[in-house]
Amino acid sequence: MAETFRSIRGKDKLVDDNNFIYNEKQRNVDGTIKYWKCEVRECNARVHTRGDRIIKYIGVHDHLSSAVKPKIKRVLGAIKDTAISSAKPSRSLIAAAVGSLTESELPELPPTSHVCRSIRYWRQSTASFPANPMSRVGFDIPERFRLLEKGDIFLQFDSGKEDVNRILLFSSEKGLDDLYSINNWAGDGTFKCCPSIFFQLYVLNVQIGSSTEALGSPTK
């Protein structure tokens, strides 16, 4: 029996009993039969399916299959689906999704930084964001950018929409608590990813255990 899943590009994929993966190419007139080609471009192996059964094999694969590859693709597809419908941090989504993988399968995943970048891209591609304002004055911050997923305050300070030197400070309540209780801070400013109407994005970090966590992000 064949198994299908949705790729991170939104395309249907098929996996046969030997763990070869196929892309759907077309269907017959009434849509009851699907025609699939091996996802490896140079390989001409094909199958035909009716429902969840392969009814015809055409050609032979000129490469080896991998039992891990289909599993990794399913995990990445699940991460994408969750990322689009949830505002949870990227690393939390990844940690939850890879729980089904064994230690020997984890190295087959793309680097975490690459997956995080993909998550940002997926969210930006599907979200309906308001147009960037032309000036830092005269506009209100929409509620969905002022609050976190559970309704907690994220926009901790706004100097006012009529302030020509407007400053916005974003942080979770826990982030503020950590800033208060931890003595060693590190600051980092960046210009490239800052909206052009503002001067700089500045991030405050504190070290918690062996990791450094970004907590406050004033923009001015």
Image (spheres, rainbow, N blue to C red):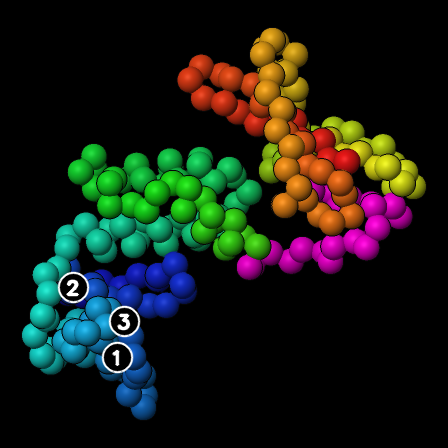
* Residue under the point 44% across and 35% down: 92
Q: Position of residue 60 (x, y in %)?
A: 7, 74
Which secondary structure, mark 2? loop
Sequence-first disc among 1 and 3: 3
Residue 111 lies left or right of residue 213; in this view the side is left
Sequence-first disc among 2 and 1: 2
Q: Name the residue under label 2.
A: 20
**Disc on res. 134:** none
* Residue under the point 23% across and 55% down: 70
Q: Position of residue 67 (x, y in %)?
A: 15, 52
Disc 2/disc 1 C-alpha distance (Å) = 16 Å
* Residue under the point 14% across and 76% down: 45
Which secondary structure, mark 3? strand
Q: What segment carries the magenta color?
A: 125-146
Q: Name the residue under label 1.
A: 34
Quadrant of the image for the C terminus? top right
Front position among marks 2 and 1: 2
Q: Quadrant of residue 7?
A: bottom left
Q: Quadrant of residue 22?
A: bottom left
* Residue under the point 51% across and 54% down: 121
Label 2 environment density (alpha carbons within 10 Å; few <14, some 14–19, many ≥20): many
Q: Position of residue 138 (x, y in %)?
A: 89, 48
Amino acid at dot 1: Lys
Q: Where is residue 61 in the image (x, y as percent from the top left)?
A: 10, 71
Q: Mark 3 points at which residue?
A: 23
Label 3 environment density (alpha carbons within 10 Å; few <14, some 14–19, many ≥20): many
Amino acid at dot 3: Asn
Disc 1/disc 3 C-alpha distance (Å) = 10 Å
Q: Quadrant of residue 107?
A: top left
